[in-house]
Amino acid sequence: MAKYTIGWMPGDGVGVDVMDATKVVLDKIGFEAEYVHGDIGWEFWRTEANPLPDRTIDMLNNVDAALFGAITSMPKEEAEEVLIPELKGTGKVYRSPIVRLRQEFNLQSNLRPCKAYAGNPLNFKDGLDLVVFRQNTEGLYMGVEYYPLPEDVRAKLTETHPQQMGKLDAVDSEDIAISTRIFTRAGCQNIVRNAFEYAKKFGYKSVTIVEKPNVVRETSGLMVREARKIAENYPGIDLWETNIDAMCMWLVKNPEDYGVLVASNMFGDIVSDLCAQLVGGLGFACSGNIGEKVAIFEPSHGSAPKYVGMNKVNPIAMILSAKMMLDHLGEKEMAIKLEKAVADVIAEGNVRTYDMGGSNTTTEMADAIAAKC
């Protein structure tokens, strides 16, 4: 009998390729699991008007953890166009299934390690070891949006913000779109505390909060104020504060100065992609969405439709996401062995996918890593 039950959601495009490659490595390392398939992605939106069917939600309620490949996403007008004829005009609106998963299961912490492995020709600087904690369920990605602007919402905003809304007096409500940025005190506290706990566990000397409180005063201000309170409980770990725009500059200039970064949803999304590029790009960018009931691990890259069926893309981000899953499940020795195998293959340089300047396939990279296990 398998030791674990793992949700298996390849999703769209090259998600299938990198998941298959990861399975080769997990099997070789001796990970005992029953993999339960989950339907998710563009095909289920097209044929069911639901990219995350209820049956997949039910499956995820009964697993120890889950692996997820990649997702294709489009604006709502384009998404409407691809629906099968009988679903067009029924009022269905596309919503990102990974965003819904994060909210459905309260996967409040998104953890994105970005590590420069020796021998990677794409490293910005050798030795970088950055970790981004991104608040995963609130902020601009919460999905509370309006278009066109409802009159009752407009009236309330005009009452509370007369100066700002007065500048829009000549603009029709049908020409105004609003996306809200919602933070809760608990959401801020949880993500900052998780970042400090990680820094304490793994010996990082600082936690940098990346926000914009000088302009986005109420939401970023709440995050910064809570971070200052929490930092008092972690002597020996410095709290650094920086604005998102300055952080992007400093990461390009002096990335070695930083260790653990923590940010709200959109700022975390931005800065984690920058950190990923510093260590080789999205082909090396793993991530974990961590909740109390379940954790879902995925690469940070997209579905890359132009590479579908070509067996071309780099599977290392997905394989390192599986390494994060092993850590989460307490399989520390397996996790160490898997990461060492990845590091050895990169260091030797005999097998490189196209993004690393080589010509090896997804499968060949997976086989090389598996052989090191």
Image (spheres, helix red, strand yellow):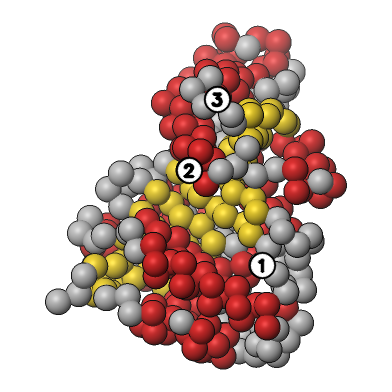
* Image location (x, y in percent) of residue 313: 61, 80
Quickly name the residue at label 1.
Answer: 117
Q: Amino acid at mark 3?
A: Pro
Q: Amino acid at mark 2?
A: Lys
Residue under the point 65% across and 44% down: 259
Please tell me how many numbered marks the rendered image carries.
Answer: 3
Which is nearer the eye, 28 or 216? 28
Callout 3 touching callout 2 (CB < 8 Å): no
Whether residue 116 appears in this view of the structure is: yes
* Image location (x, y in percent) of residue 89: 42, 58
Q: Nearer the viewer, mark 2 or mark 1?
A: 2
Of pointers 2 and 1, the one earlier in the residue sequence:
1
Which is nearer the eye, 66 or 46? 66
Whether residue 281 appears in this view of the structure is: no
Residue 20 shown left or right of residue 315 in the figure: left
Residue 35 shown left or right of residue 203 in the figure: left
* Image location (x, y in percent) of residue 36: 26, 72
Callout 2 touching callout 1 (CB < 8 Å): no
Q: Nearer the viewer, mark 1 or mark 3?
A: 3
* SS of the residue under disc 2: helix
* SS of the residue under disc 1: loop
**In this view, 126 is above or below 351:** above
* Image location (x, y in percent) of residue 51: 39, 62
Q: Rounded to the nearest whole Å, what is the CA distance between mark 1 and mark 3? A: 30 Å
Quickly name the residue at label 2.
Answer: 201
Residue under the point 55% across and 31% down: 181
**In this view, 365 is above or below 287:** below
Quickly name the residue at label 3.
Answer: 235
